[in-house]
Amino acid sequence: MNWKLSPSDLVFLYEECPRCFYLKVRGLENRPKTQMPKIFTTIDAQMKSFLRGQRTDGLAIGMPKGTFRYAERWVESAPIAIPGRISSCYFRGRFDNILELDTGGHALADLKTCHRRDEHVPLYARQLHAYTWCLEHPSPGALHLSPIERMGLLVFEPDFFLKLPFWSGALSGGLHWIEIRRDDNSFLDFIAELVCLLDRPTAPDPAFDCPWCRYRSLPVWVGPELPRIQ
């Protein structure tokens, strides 16, 4: 098998419940999608629109020097051979932003609108590593950019409201750059674990606190048929 992996599923789906991850990748069952509140998608869209073609100078401390060049592009990797396994895998997904650096290379910048939580940074690192692998090892005809020299999160933390003229207002807050250290060896070890999991003939046990697995395990109603309303 050549398992198709979504970079976004490496963030929370796998971490929340390996069984749900296994069932989705194998095409057996998908979790119901959770809709993101409209305010977050609106802020995200406005940030991407503003940043297109902009320089990074003065945007956030520690951010690499360059220009926002690509946004929301689909990428796909060539198959990844896993040592000792017959199965392989590949990534397909859509990144947020890519910077064209002054050094000649590129950087991945993932936009977030939230308060920073340190425990989530290693999870987002998996996603950015997957996009990096797609760009440097693309499938035929897919977007190819190399090298990817930097990766990070550009986090907008709105914390106060501004009243503007002419009956309008705005949210304001800090912009922070969180650098993601690149570690291809650890990432490929993690991917090998995923392929071993997916090659199993049966699904793993559900996570103890997975709400969807709990719902799935509820008994089916087998009582008398309820009267129909005429």
Image (cartoon, rainbow, N blue to C red):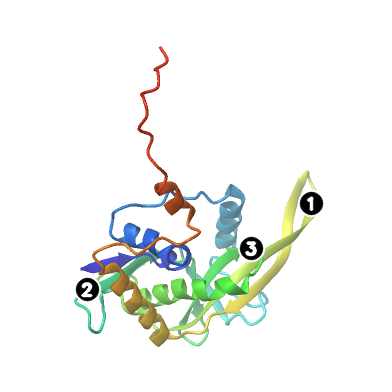
* Residue 156 placement, left or right of 23: right
Q: Is residue 34 above or below residue 205?
A: above
- Amino acid of disc 3: Cys
Task: Assess disc 2: are there few (<14), some (14-19) or many (≥20) residues with their C-alpha within 10 Å of its C-alpha.
Answer: some
Foreground label between 3 and 2: 2
Alpha carbons under labels 3 and 2: distance apart: 38 Å
Q: Nearer the viewer, mark 2 or mark 1?
A: 2
| Amino acid at pointer 1 | Leu
Q: In which quarter of the image is the N terminus?
A: bottom left
Q: Comparing marks 1 and 3, which lies closer to the viewer?
A: 3
Residue 144 in sight = no
Indicate the secondary structure of the residue bearing disc 2.
loop
Q: Nearer the viewer, residue 156 or 12?
A: 12
* 36 and 177: which is toward the camera: 36
- The residue lying furthest to the top in this view is 230
Residue at the image position 23 percent from the left and 65 percent from the top: 201
For marks 2 and 1 on the same chain, the one whose residue lies earlier in the sequence: 2
Name the N-terminal-most of marks 3 and 2.
2
First along the sequence among labels 1 and 3: 3
The residues tagged by marks 1 and 3 sit, at their Cα atoms, a distance apart of 23 Å
State the quadrant of the C terminus.
top left
Q: Where is residue 52 in the image (x, y as percent from the top left)?
A: 54, 65
Q: Mark 1 points at which residue?
A: 164
**For the residue carrying disc 3, how many other residues have a C-alpha within 10 Å: few (<14), some (14-19), or many (20+)?**
few
Q: Mark 2 points at which residue?
A: 87
Residue at numbered disc 3? 114
Task: Identify the amino acid type marked 2.
Answer: Ser
